Image (cartoon, coloured by chain):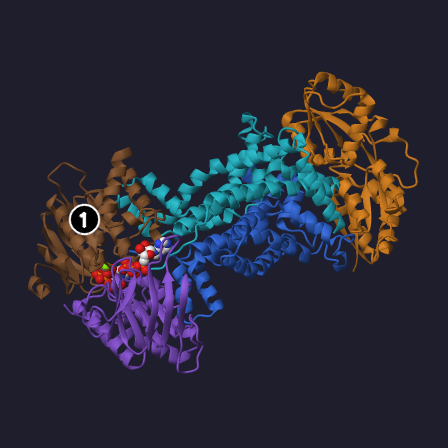
Chain colours: A cyan, B blue, C orange, D purple, E brown
Amino acid sequence: MHELMNTAREALHLLLSFDPALWEIIGVSFRVSLTAILVALPPALLIALLLARVAFPGRWFAISLVNTFMAVPTVVVGLVLFMLLSRSGPLGELRLLFTQRAMIIGQILLAMPVLTAMLHSTLQSIDQRAWETARQLGAGWWQSLWVLIREARFGVIAAVLAAFGRIIAEVGSAVMIGGNIEHFTRTITTAIALETLKGEFAQGLALGLVLLLLALVLNVLLGVMRGRGHQTVSI
Amino acid sequence: MHELMNTAREALHLLLSFDPALWEIIGVSFRVSLTAILVALPPALLIALLLARVAFPGRWFAISLVNTFMAVPTVVVGLVLFMLLSRSGPLGELRLLFTQRAMIIGQILLAMPVLTAMLHSTLQSIDQRAWETARQLGAGWWQSLWVLIREARFGVIAAVLAAFGRIIAEVGSAVMIGGNIEHFTRTITTAIALETLKGEFAQGLALGLVLLLLALVLNVLLGVMRGRGHQTVSI
Amino acid sequence: ADIVRLATTTSTYNSGLLDYLLPKFEEDHPYQIQVIPVGTGKALRLGRDGDVDLVLTHAPAAEKAFVDADYGVEPHGVMYNDFVIVGPSGDPAAIDGGEDATNAFATLADEGATFISRGDDSGTDKKEKHLWEEADVTPDFKGFRAAGQGMGEVLKMASELQGYTLTDRGTWLAMKDKLDLEIMVEGDTALFNPYQVILVNPQRYDGLNTQGAQALAEWLISDEGQDLIDAFRLKGKALFHASAGEKIDPTSAVHESD
Amino acid sequence: MLEVSQLAHGFGRQPALWEIPYLQWQGHTLVHLRGDNGSGKTTLLRLLAGLETPRQGTIRWTWAEAMPASPPCPGRVLYLHQQPYLFDTSVAGNLRYVARWNGWRGTTARDRVAAMLERCGLAAHAQQRARSLSGGERMRLALARAWLLSPRVLLLDEPTASLDRQAIADVSTLISSLHEAGCAIVLSAHQSSVLTERCDEYWCLEQRCLQVNAFKQEVAV
Amino acid sequence: MLEVSQLAHGFGRQPALWEIPYLQWQGHTLVHLRGDNGSGKTTLLRLLAGLETPRQGTIRWTWAEAMPASPPCPGRVLYLHQQPYLFDTSVAGNLRYVARWNGWRGTTARDRVAAMLERCGLAAHAQQRARSLSGGERMRLALARAWLLSPRVLLLDEPTASLDRQAIADVSTLISSLHEAGCAIVLSAHQSSVLTERCDEYWCLEQRCLQVNAFKQEVAV
Ligand SMILES: Nc1ncnc2c1ncn2[C@@H]1O[C@H](COP(=O)(O)OP(=O)(O)OP(=O)(O)O)[C@@H](O)[C@H]1O
Ligand SMILES: Nc1ncnc2c1ncn2[C@@H]1O[C@H](COP(=O)(O)OP(=O)(O)OP(=O)(O)O)[C@@H](O)[C@H]1O
Ligand SMILES: [Mg+2]
Ligand SMILES: [Mg+2]
């Protein structure tokens, strides 16, 4: 217990000391993960809409497949990307390995299944009349999609948060294709893994708390934005 | 490309050879993760219901907190549990470290936030009249809860799958508190991590594919169970 | 069976040495060994916290501190191998051929060559830091990259980025087929790499399996264990040299030509 | 018996929808609740069913028989939503829920469910998904669910709005027999029909007040 | 002009709800569509609006003016759900959506929205969340949304079911003026009212057939 308390204190100290090395790592983490989410969101939305609204043969299998991809271990994504981006791999010429760009690609791959599966379940639960009504009232295809998203906004936010949580917290692919290089591709989680490897548990835990504090700030901001959206249906 | 093809072939071979060592690892993985999900589900449901239906001061903060916990890195959960369960930690007397039981605890902690957040978003999207109607028609509190879950079954299944995907694919906490001990606490993901560490990428990837194949089987089964549940609301 | 927990570095585990040794030990002893492969730092930490019964590591300075602080008892040298400096076949920084590791490091810094450092406080990392000190450079030159990962990953990274790195010979041998690298410097006495087995101090924690740990440690330094270590081959190459009770001559470090 | 005093309710910071200084109802009659769109009929019925807490004032149900006093008490005072919520299962499944919740088992449950389906003209739709019913069929199913419980008091929010002429006649008959069996009923409806004509009492929400028996003539027109 | 031939539709493996060998409608009249619960009124209207594909047969809309021919063509043939779907925003927001989708901007949009709110008696509720409206107010909002578009043909599915007497009168006036402005209207309704009495034509779904102008007398009763 005592050690845990010390660690918490150390974490706060770390955060408040504005240690530039720490903020550099935080910057890399958030830049990579936020970019990945932003890039992954539009295609995930489209696929989710397709799966939720368009009847095509093999749809059920496609949904199962998306759900399955949620179980892809991060190391496996890391491995596959590594093999593709490696000098001896088919995309070696791009020289992407051990760059932030490669990490973003990895996290996009990790975020896609979570986003798609959650968005599918959300969009599917929206009343079919919503789409019909929008189309009838003159909305184009994209406008109707936008209305659906607005109607499903709580679910969409939950999906984005889940995906963001997954990729900001992941270490397997970040370390494999980022390489945990100081000042370049070291993120909070790869730094934690390193500290743990060294047996510096307190330091690792402190970094973890820093990550949590920042995630909390982000979530509270979102919570305020989203406002109080509970139903008051009395009819 | 060639290497990737070979690896895929090797994976199939591994799976079909019914190598007992492989199946042992698979057994550990699924036993641990499924147990964790089963244990985590009821409390997650209750908390989600509370957050979705009961107005109490600080509810929004509580929701943000749950969302935040989705961003807890697996290594951090591993670390904290490690420090608690270590011989020198407060719970060291339980002798849980490096056992499957400890891994289950770790995965419960990892599954809870994902489950709770997803279930909250699902239960919240269910029409308030569902609960009222059930109560009016004589359902008890638990029966009404059960009806809500049934009404929200697609979302509930999506939540369970997301949480399952997260914990079966995680390696950080499994390796920290399980210890990756052969025949005892080696799971698919810790084995992958080990193979990767050794540079045996093909072997690691093969294990990853095995995991995916099994997850796919599980998902297709669930998909069949869930059936074709798309709305046909015409009114 | 009676369970003994051994924390060891990934290098010994990944080379396959323990998979080769331990079944032979378990055959004639009533113990079952659970191996927990981690970094040196974490292995010693596990020992300090009493979560394992003994450790097998290769970081002399850290091990000395571990024993001095009474966390561990009965340290024994078990075996050794050595470090080598590896780099891309073209050798852009022109350090090849020498036996002088310090000199080679100084050249790397002067040339601003790409160098991948473990940067994880492991035994190898400590050795590397020591060499930078000897060469009188602060490692912040243009091509210096602190990866903070295990040996295998760092080797992979060096190969991908066509840079230099310092590695233990075991990992190097295990991985060199998959790498686009060659040995640049080897045989320097400064590149010596000894392994020790240390029991966790039974006075600090109840319920440690010290008896089993002792049996294992004694077996490792027994003639039987030592012969087996010497006989171990990875891809046809000897990897570890048994050294129990010897005052080792560092110059006899294994060479790849063995 | 229902006793309401000083009741007022509204939403947000708006003024109260209406104020009801005092209302007593023996709970034996068939009441037609009337009022313009937005006059607060739904709100009043929900308050009476205990689904909402009044901003001000009290609502008390008292029973001659010794039974739990305050709503919501399932099976005693039952409110039917204006747009009924159907559980996402088959039509028969919706009724089976009610049977299960009220502890009926085996053949009892099966018989009662089947009889009710027959009575409400839904037998042909028993296996259909409830959500795919037509507007009128939905309302019938909701009524069937409520009748299964034979509540002491039934609060029906525009039960006849989307029913055809024949259905209204059937519902009227059913309601009358329920009423005769001792069930008190308040129903809201905009349009007069054979059902509203059978009512004994008229409540009207007008000018933010509840007027009792004030417009019998007007309706009868 | 609407031309329907050999039309039949049903659900699952059940027999068709009805069969319509041939129907031609010039699209100038005000039509009252009638039929019992479950006779297939909603289904027919949805088919006409192009929201469903018929199991068999064809539906063709042709216009004198050169315009896209096949439904769904927004703003041309507009179907109003029996239970309208309101977007989860304010009442005014629901109308602003329509304005945006149809490319109106700035003051034009604002003025039209405000005028329509006024016309439909919803001005007082402009900022309220649409989902919290009363039953009648919901229907008015749905009507307001549709009117904003001034469609060529309007298919109204029981628009008056939950409206009060005054509202029905208002709606009748509005529908009449829309009709005079050239909008053809089909509306389904169970109960006769001032609105149904204004209809020029009667369609009745009876015994699995569509009978045109067959029951004018009966309704007038
Ligand atoms: N949650 C809410 N927030 C704000 N206003 C509300 C809310 N719920 C209802 N209202 C308003 O209160 C008024 C009364 O609503 P209520 O549903 O009780 O009317 P009603 O008499 O049932 O009308 P109708 O005949 O149209 O069903 C309406 O103007 C409605 O817009
Ligand atoms: N998706 C569906 N699957 C099966 N049956 C359906 C489906 N949709 C509608 N039906 C059935 O088809 C019949 C016609 O439905 P429809 O909604 O067109 O009737 P309606 O004439 O509008 O009735 P109401 O006056 O009650 O609104 C009903 O019996 C209904 O149960
Ligand atoms: Mg109402
Ligand atoms: Mg209908």
Which chain contains the residue that carries disc 1?
A: E
At label 1, the amino acid type is Leu
Horizontal and vertical percent position of residue B86: 75, 52
Q: Could you say which is closer to the camera, residue E10 or residue E109?
A: E109
Q: Is residue A50 visible?
A: no
Q: Give the quadrant of residue C169.
A: top right
The percent position of residue D46, horizontal first and vertical second, equals 36, 65
The C terminus of chain A lies in which quarter of the figure?
A: bottom left
What residue is shown at x 24% (from left), y 46% (from top)? E118
- Identified at 42% across, 54% down, the residue is B125
Q: State ligand 4's quadrant.
A: bottom left
**Residue with the mark numbered 1:** E154
- The image shows a total of numbered marks equal to 1
The residue located at (10%, 58%) in the rendering is E197
Q: In this view, does E187 lie above or below A169?
A: below
* Relative image position of residue C44 (x, y in whole percent): 80, 44
> Is C78 situated above or below E57?
above
Answer yes or no: is residue E61 visible. yes
Secondary structure under tag 1 reads strand
